[in-house]
Amino acid sequence: MSVHRVVALVLPPQSTFELACAAEVFGVSRPGLPARYDFEVCAERRGSVSTLAGYHMAVDQGLSALAAADTVVIPGWQHSGQPAPPAVIDALRQAHRRGARVVAICSGAFLLAQAGLLDHRRATTHWRMAAELADRFPDVQVEPDTLYIDLGDVATSAGSAAGIDLCLHLVRADHGAAYAAQIARHMIMPPHREGGQLQYATHASTDRLPDSLAPVLDWAAERLHEPLTVDDLAARARVSTRTLARRFADQLGVSPGRWLLRQRVTAAQALLEESDLPVETIATRVGLSSATNLRRHFHSMVHTTPATYRRSFGRHR
C-alpha cells in the first residue's frame, strides 16, 4: 500500500494547536500501527515562521512541496480579513486542480474561500467566524453548526479540537474505522463525536455544568450486544427519558437514540474490518438484530453496504 503524503501549509503567525491536530493524526509513528501517512510542513518561503505561542519554527519546505501532496492541510489562518499572498492562492489552486485533497481547519476556510474552492459549496468554520465567512463570501454555503464537512476534494472544520475530528474522519475514509479508532485510542480521544459545534457556543446563562453522561456512555458502549433502549439509558442515569434527551442535546448535540445507533454501526465497521464473521452474526453482536437491519442503518450512516465496506477495508484486502 502506497503512503499518502500530507503537507500542512503554515501561515504566520501560525496556531500551534491547529497544526498539532494534523501532525498528531498524520505525522506520529505509533508502535504496532502501520505508517500510512507521510507528513511534512511547508510555508510560502522556507525559513523561520512565527507562531501564536510566542516562538518561531524552522520550516524547510517552500510552496513547491504542495506539488507532490496527496492532501494539503491549512491549519488555520490568522489574517483571514486580509488578501492572501498570490503565490499561496496559486499554489492551492494548482494542487486542487491536479487532484490533491485540500483541507482547512477553523479559519483556514477563509483561505480556501479566497482561492474560490468553496464557491457554491458547503463549508464550516469556528462558530464565532461563521457569520463573517458568510458575509464576505456570499457564494459559500456556510453551515455554522457543523463540526466538519467533507466534500471529497475539499474539507473544512470548526475550530480547534474539531480539526482532530476532521482529521480522524479523513483517516476513516482512507483506511477504515478500525485504523482510525487505533489512532484515536493512542490519542485518548473518541474516534467520532456526534452533534454540532453550537453545543459549545457561549450561552446567555448557565447555572451549573450538566451532570456528565460519561458513566452512562461507557456503560452502554460495553453492552452494545444487548437490546438496549433509550429507556435503559435513562434508567441507568436515574433520570426521565425527557431529562436524558436534554442532557444528550446539551452535551453531545444529538439524541440518545441517534448516539446509540452510531455506536452500533461503528462497532459493526470494526468487525467488518477485523473479522470474517458473517453479516448476520455481526448484526447480532452489535445489537441490530438482523442483517437487514444492519444493512439499512449501515447504508444510511456510511453510505455503502457492509459487503462493499469489507472489501475496501477488511483485513484481507
Image (cartoon, grey):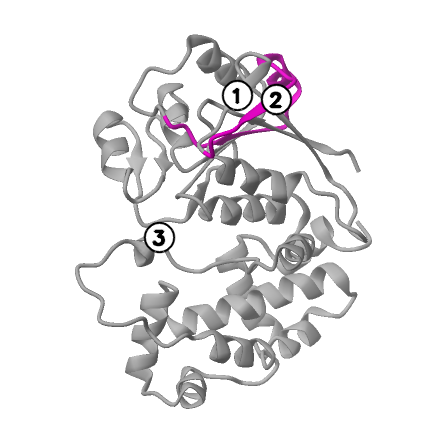
What stretch of residues is rendered in magenta?
A: 53-78
Residue underneath mark 3? 197
Examine the image and state in which quarter residue 209 appears.
bottom left
Tell which circle, 3 or 2, labels the residue nearer the N-terminal end.
2
Give the residue displayed 38% in from the left and 90% down from the top.
Answer: 238
The three-letter amino acid code for the residue at tag 1 is Val
Instruction: Classify mark 3: residues with Cα within 10 Å, few (<14), some (14-19) or many (20+).
Output: many
The picture quadrant where one finds residue 13 is top left
* Vertical side of 65 occupied by 72: above or below: below
Reading the image, the residue beneath label 1 is: 49
* 21 inside magenta stretch: no
* In this rendering, position of residue 176 left or right of residue 231: right
- The amino acid type, in three-letter code, at marker 2 is Ala
Q: Position of residue 274 (x, y in %)?
A: 76, 62
Location of the N terminus (image quadrant): top right
Q: Residue farthest to the top?
A: 86
Q: What element does badge 1 sit on?
A: strand
Nearer to us of marks 3 and 1 is 1
Q: Which comes sooner in the sequence, label 3 or label 1?
A: 1
The residue nearer to you, when weighing 174 against 87, is: 87
The answer to which of 278 and 273 lies nearer the viewer is 273
Residue denoted by label 2: 58
Q: Which mark is residue 196?
A: none
Callout 3 secondary element: helix
Report if residue 69 lies within the magenta region. Answer: yes
